[in-house]
Image: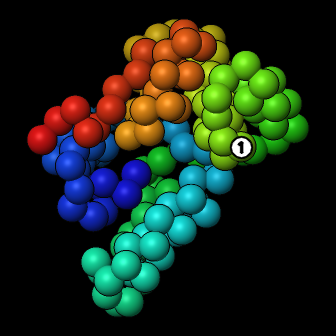
Amino acid sequence: MVKRYAVEPGSNWLRNLLDPTNRNTVVLAEITLAEFAAAISAKHRAGTISSADRTDILNLFLHHCDTEYQLTATNRAVLDRAVALVQSQPLRGYDGVQLATGLSSRDVLATIGITDFIFVSADHNLLAAASAEGLVVDNPNNYS
């Protein structure tokens, strides 16, 4: 998600994908809020964005969470699925939760006829695990 708000490889591709006029449904695990805030704060600590930029970016992301993204609760069922995933895939804890959320979201969307679900991440290990679990994946870093 950081690529939408800060210039990085793949930013243009991700911004296009997330553009509301494209009418894509964007599903995020609730934990993405904390992960995003941490990533933006790391950019600030590294000196690549100012304090004001950090605040503005975080506020815009939180606004989009309210207006453009569908946030999925990190409930016990998702956590149980994540526990199983980190046993079978080489994932960190939060990545397991992200993947469990993706799998659960795909399953729910399929029940209402939405089958063109794509799991997007710039993390190679997470994408490999998602692919191994049967998700269609894409990496914004593959696009300039």
Residue 49: % across, % down: 30, 80
Left or right: 72 as drawn, with respect to 62 = right
Taking the spot 33% from the left edge, 32% from the top edge, the residue there is 139
- Tell me if residue 135 comes above or below residue 95 in the rendering: above
Q: State the residue at coordinates (87%, 38%).
A: 76
User: In terms of image quadrants, where is residue 99?
Assistant: top right
In the figure, 140 relative to 62: above or below? above
Pick whichever, 82 or 52, lies toward us.
82
Q: Quadrant of residue 110?
A: top right
Determine the residue positioned at 55% across, 12% down. 132
Q: Position of residue 29 (x, y in %)?
A: 61, 44
Q: How is the image coloured?
A: rainbow
Tell whether 83 sits left or right of 15: right
Which residue does the numbered mark 1 point to in the structure image? Answer: 93
Q: Amino acid at mark 1?
A: Gly
Relative height, residue 101 to residue 38 (above, below): above
Instruction: Bin the neighbour count of mark 1 within 10 Å (Cα to Cα): few under 14, some 14-19, many 20 and up.
Output: some
* Residue sitting at x 52%, y 38%: 27
Residue 26 is at least partly visible in this image: yes
100 relative to 138 in the view: left or right: right
